[in-house]
Image (tube, helix red, strand yellow):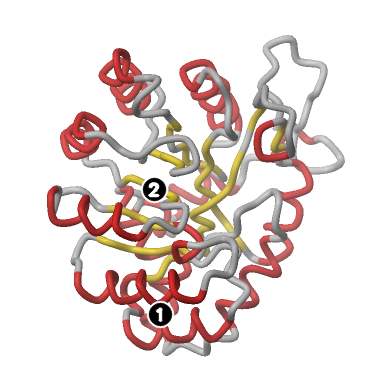
């Protein structure tokens, strides 16, 4: 089972780019299937209302539970008065397994971390090249697992990559995903120094999951570390070890169901739905 630990889904309302307008999964899911990716972690795009976005994401995940696991997204400052409700609903009602916070908007607050610890949810925290932020959080909240996407810098910041790699080595609760890292030698260095801390992610649907997966395969990791990078570690952090259950009962429950109700494209996307929960 290969798990993509970084993918966006649903609609936003910013209209400055795909990252805050819409992340449709139809093309992504076809590409992921072709690349051999069996499961994907999804979270909302940027939006002004994360409570509504998380509810839309829950409907998306509920339609394809064999393919998707949800993370809630939030703005720790703007949503501060409703954090308990927002995260509690995500964990207890939606069955989400993690929290997404983007440093371009805000940084995790103490309540965010306390609730993550309570529900045993990792925090996918885009540090936005501010490596000191994860440095402080990691030792303040050793009971919370933090995942740093893009190895800390989507903008090809070499020094950020190396600082985050050092943090992976030093902090037991800090991990990083591979999404969008174009400097291959930085990925290779992370795989050499902290292979147990590296997690495959694609930044889909905006980046091609097959291309992002090819970079990880080119690391030529030994079998055990490769299995962990490609799905084992994120399954542990999110409590989704069941995804590796290959028993006949699970195959009958999940694998034998046609995707999308038998639609020719195999994905079941319906843009005519009134609830706006697009793929």
Is 211 above or below relative to 65? below
Q: Position of residue 222 (x, y in %)?
A: 42, 89
Is 94 above or below relative to 23? above
Q: Residues within 10 Å of mark 2 (few under 14, many from 20)?
A: many
- Looking at the picture, tell me which residue is in the foreground, 138 or 121: 138
Circle 1 SS class = helix
Numbered tag placed on residue 206 in the rendering: none
Of labels 2 and 1, earlier in sequence is: 2
Would you say residue 1 is visible in this rendering? no
Residue at 35% x, 49% y is: 240
Q: How many marks?
A: 2
Residue at 52% x, 46% y is: 252
Q: Residues within 10 Å of mark 1 (few under 14, many from 20)?
A: many
Residue 199 position by quadrant: bottom left
Numbered tag placed on residue 125 in the rendering: 2
Q: Residue furthest right?
A: 264
Image side of residue 157 versus residue 118, left or right: right
- Looking at the picture, tell me which residue is in the foreground, 263 or 83: 83
Circle 2 SS class = strand
Is 95 above or below relative to 238? above
Residue at 57% x, 57% y is: 38
For the residues marked 2 and 1, what is the alpha-carbon distance in whole angstroms? Answer: 18 Å
Residue at 49% x, 81% y is: 186
Q: Are marks 2 and 1 in contact (CB under 8 Å)?
A: no
Would you say residue 14 is visible in this rendering? yes
Residue 163 position by quadrant: bottom left
Q: Position of residue 241 (x, y in %)?
A: 33, 55
Residue 129 position by quadrant: bottom left
Q: Position of residue 18 (x, y in %)?
A: 73, 39
Q: Quadrant of the C terminus?
A: top right
Q: Which residue is mark 1?
A: 190
């Amino acid at each position: 089972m290969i798990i993509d630990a970084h993918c966006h889904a649903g609609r936003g309302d910013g209209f400055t780019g795909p990252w805050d307008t819409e992340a449709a999964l139809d093309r992504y899911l076809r590409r992921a299937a072709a690349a051999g990716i069996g499961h994907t972690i999804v979270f909302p795009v940027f939006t002004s209302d994360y409570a509504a976005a998380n509810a839309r994401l829950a409907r998306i995940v509920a339609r394809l539970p064999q393919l998707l696991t949800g993370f809630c997204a939030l703005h720790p400052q703007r949503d501060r008065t409703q954090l308990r409700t927002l995260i509690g609903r995500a964990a207890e009602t939606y069955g989400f397994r993690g929290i997404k916070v983007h440093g371009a908007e805000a940084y995790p607050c103490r309540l965010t971390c306390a609730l993550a610890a309570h529900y045993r949810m990792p925090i996918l925290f885009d540090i936005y090249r501010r490596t000191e932020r994860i440095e402080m959080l990691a030792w303040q909240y050793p009971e919370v697992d933090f995942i740093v996407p893009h190895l800390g810098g989507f903008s090809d910041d070499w020094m950020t990559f190396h600082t985050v790699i050092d943090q992976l080595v030093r902090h037991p609760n800090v991990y990083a995903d591979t999404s969008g890292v174009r400097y291959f030698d930085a990925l290779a260095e992370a795989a050499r120094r902290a292979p147990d801390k590296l997690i495959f992610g694609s930044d889909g649907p905006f980046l091609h999951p097959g291309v992002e997966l090819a970079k990880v395969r080119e690391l030529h990791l030994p079998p055990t570390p490769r299995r962990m990078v490609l799905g084992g570690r994120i399954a542990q952090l999110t409590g989704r070890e069941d995804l590796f259950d290959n028993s006949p009962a699970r195959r009958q429950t999940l694998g034998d169901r046609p995707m999308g109700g038998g639609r020719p494209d195999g994905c079941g996307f319906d843009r005519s739905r009134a609830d706006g929960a697009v793929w």
